Amino acid sequence: MTGCLVYYPYDLVRDSPLTSPGAASPEEILAGLDGPQRGYDDEIQPRLATAEERRILSLAQVSVVLELARTAYTADRGPVLVSHQIRRVTARSTVTRSRARQRADRRAENAHSRP
């Protein structure tokens, strides 16, 4: 993986250990601030790797990476986390993507079937 960027709503984490250097468990801290994370939405997009990604990941000239954006929510659907990752494509990541897509499809079907 080339890296992961994580964003938290500033108003939520302003005075928490997440804004200070040092070890912290985001899940525990978020659970204490505004209730535990209750779900998330993933957006997964395969694409060609950039020159920098190929260099960092030691990939072949023509390679595919997975771009993953995750938004985590509280029970009332308030966002508590947004993360962005770039991952190298492997046989396992392809299976994981398929399972994630299936879960996302089921969530979408359930959301549309609610009154």
Image (spheres, rainbow, N blue to C red):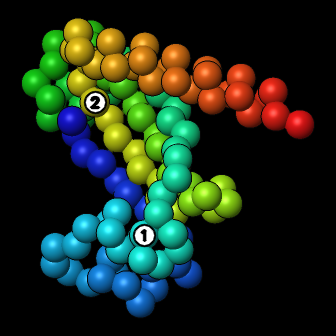
Q: The disc labelled 2 sits on which kind of residue?
A: Arg
Is 114 displayed left or right of 82 in the figure?
A: right
Q: Relative to 82, is 60 on the left or the right?
A: left
What's under tag 1, amino acid-wise? Ala
Label 2 sits on residue: 87
Chain-order first, disc 1 or disc 2: 1
Q: Position of residue 79 (x, y in %)?
A: 58, 59
As drawn, which residue projects farthest toward the right? 115
The N terminus lies in which quarter of the figure? top left
Q: What residue occupies the far bottom of the structure in this picture?
A: 15
Left/right of residue 48 with respect to residue 110 in the rendered view: left
Residue that mark 1 sits on: 31
Q: Position of residue 28 (x, y in %)?
A: 33, 69
The image shows residue 113, relative to residue 61, as above or below, that is: below
Crowd band around label 2 with a 10 angstrom C-alpha radius: few (<14), some (14–19), many (20+): some
Identify the residue shown where x is 48% and y is 57%.
37
Element type at mark 2: strand
Q: Are marks 1 and 2 in contact (CB under 8 Å)?
A: no
Extreme-front residue of the structure:
115
Looking at the image, can residue 65 be seen?
yes
Task: Say which quarter of the image contains residue 87.
Answer: top left
Horizontal and vertical percent position of residue 47 = 42, 19
Mark 1–mark 2 distance (CA, rounded to whole Å): 28 Å
Q: Residue at x 47, y 63 (%)?
A: 36
Residue plotted at (34% across, 63% down): 27
